[in-house]
Image (cartoon, grey):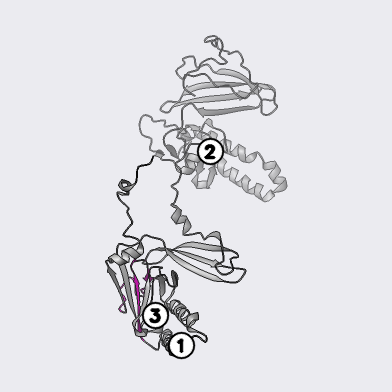
Amino acid sequence: MSASGAVEPGPSGVAAAPSSAPARAPAPGRLFRPISAEDEEQQPTEIESLCMNCYRNGVTRLLLTRIPFFREIIVSSFSCEHCGWNNTEIQSAGRIQDQGVRYSLNVRAPEDMNREVVKTDSATTRIPELDFEIPAFSQKGALTTVEGLISRAISGLEQDQPTRRVNEEAIAERIDEFIVKLRELKHVASPFTLIIDDPSGNSFVENPHAPQKDDALVITHYNRTPQQEEMLGLQAEAPEKKPEEDDLRNEVLQFNTNCPECNAPAQTNMKLVQIPHFKEVIIMATSCENCGHRTNEVKSGGAVEPLGTRISLHITDPSDMTRDLLKSETCSVEIPELEFELGMAVLGGKFTTLEGLLKDIRELVTKNPFTLGDSSNPGQTEKLLEFSHKLDQILEGKMKAHFIMNDPAGNSYLQNVYAPEDDPEMKVEHYKRTFDQNEELGLNDMRTEGYETGLAPQR
């Protein structure tokens, strides 16, 4: 409401009563006469309204006035001639301020109890010495004094005391003791602090020495928090949304698929995992409830690296079998001591341990259907038995060997147990891919820049 505008109508059914002021009659077609804080007459506008106590007609008087060294406020006062109930409230005549305000008054003398106070609905009142607080929006705004604030608090506590004494006698006694302490504050037997914190910035505590500084009064302006903005009904800035990837790290996604063995409906679980000292990978696991078949697969969560990676580990101790290992689909494996090489895409992508991968290799080789049964070659069978025996020795730590992973895409990983220090038994080399390796990865025909020029015009 502007300082010079007309008062807005109250609840429905409220009618205007003739003003008691002899001058400034309302203009034709307007419900209320214009009021202004600069009005020399300072005559209130009167309207008829219902008494909230006996629900009979009473009179509400509205006055727009200016508080020195503060701002304009609207004072509304209601009085019922039937039951004698009355009520006084204040509202700010301006907008919500850009910053909140906090008044801290050190009450040291009885004169301080007479300081005028404007307390809006959104203000919180505290007296730290008594650990006492009046929360925001628990009382209507008021134009009063420091003594009036305390008296109002006492009245609020005494209001339900008769009922408490019947139902909760112990609580009623404690409240009576607290009311005695509040009454003692009015005599200022000892100094205390009154704090009024208003996020709207429209509360006020009088400085009787204005325009000079008041040593007993500290005024602090502050920026509102998002919670205070929301409390006042203002549009607070929406918190920044985290990227989707951050949410995926904490979730296991599921999607429907078919079992690769029996083709029955199954579910595949997918999760994004951050491998320490490496990168993010996507682990997918499928379990079939119909036939019990289980499979897992690992995909790199990033792009193809600029350089290929070759990892060489000298297996010298059984503890090496517990190293975490990520083998991508583009990674080949070599064990020179066994004259063994596993090509790209064989066994697919896996996130396991070194022991787990060697066991998968043993199962792949020894259970090959072309090397079993009547069609098997005796010499070939002996070689397989010898290979399996040596692999078992490596798994048991009885045979030293070299384990080599060669990934042109650079997306494979073998755990360095000494990280972030160098591992004396492991060597990591980065190399430039050959033309054939780029061809196998499909990079030679991939164009990421200037591809628009090669497109045929659309007709």
**Looking at the image, is mark 2 or mark 1 nearer the viewer?**
1
Measured in 3D between alpha carbons, the distance from the residue under mark 2 to the one under mark 3, in whole angstroms, is: 79 Å
Question: Which is nearer the N-term, disc 3 or disc 1?
Answer: 3
Please tell me whether residue 209 is drawn above or below residue 175 in the rendered image.
above
Q: Which mark is residue 377?
A: 1
User: Looking at the picture, how far across and down is residue 198, in whole percent?
Assistant: 47, 37
Q: Residue at x 46, y 27 (%)?
A: 94
The part of the image, by quadrant, that contains residue 15 is top right
Distance, label 3 to label 1, CA atoms, is 35 Å
Q: Which residues are magenta?
A: 400-424
Of callouts 2 and 1, the N-terminal one? 2
**Mark 3 neighbour class, 10 Å CA radius: few under 14, some 14 to 19, many 20 or more:** many
Which residue sits at x=30%, y=78%?
424
The residue that mark 3 highlights is 320
The answer to whether any part of residue 368 appears in the image is no
- The picture places residue 6, in percent across and down from the top left corner, at 52, 18
Rendered position, 89 above or below 457: above
| SS type, badge 1 | loop
Question: Mark 3 is on which residue type?
Answer: Asp
The circle drawn on residue 186 is 2
Residue 73 x, y percent position in the rendering: 49, 26
Q: Is residue 403 magenta?
A: yes
Q: Is residue 248 above or below residue 393?
A: above
Q: Is residue 266 visible?
A: yes
Quadrant where the C terminus is found in the figure: top left
Q: Quadrant of residue 217?
A: top left
Q: Amino acid at mark 1?
A: Asn
Q: Are marks 2 and 3 in contact (CB under 8 Å)?
A: no
Instruction: Give the side of residue 432 with respect to residue 44, left or right.
Output: left
Which amino acid type corresponds to the residue marked 2 in the rendered image? Answer: Lys
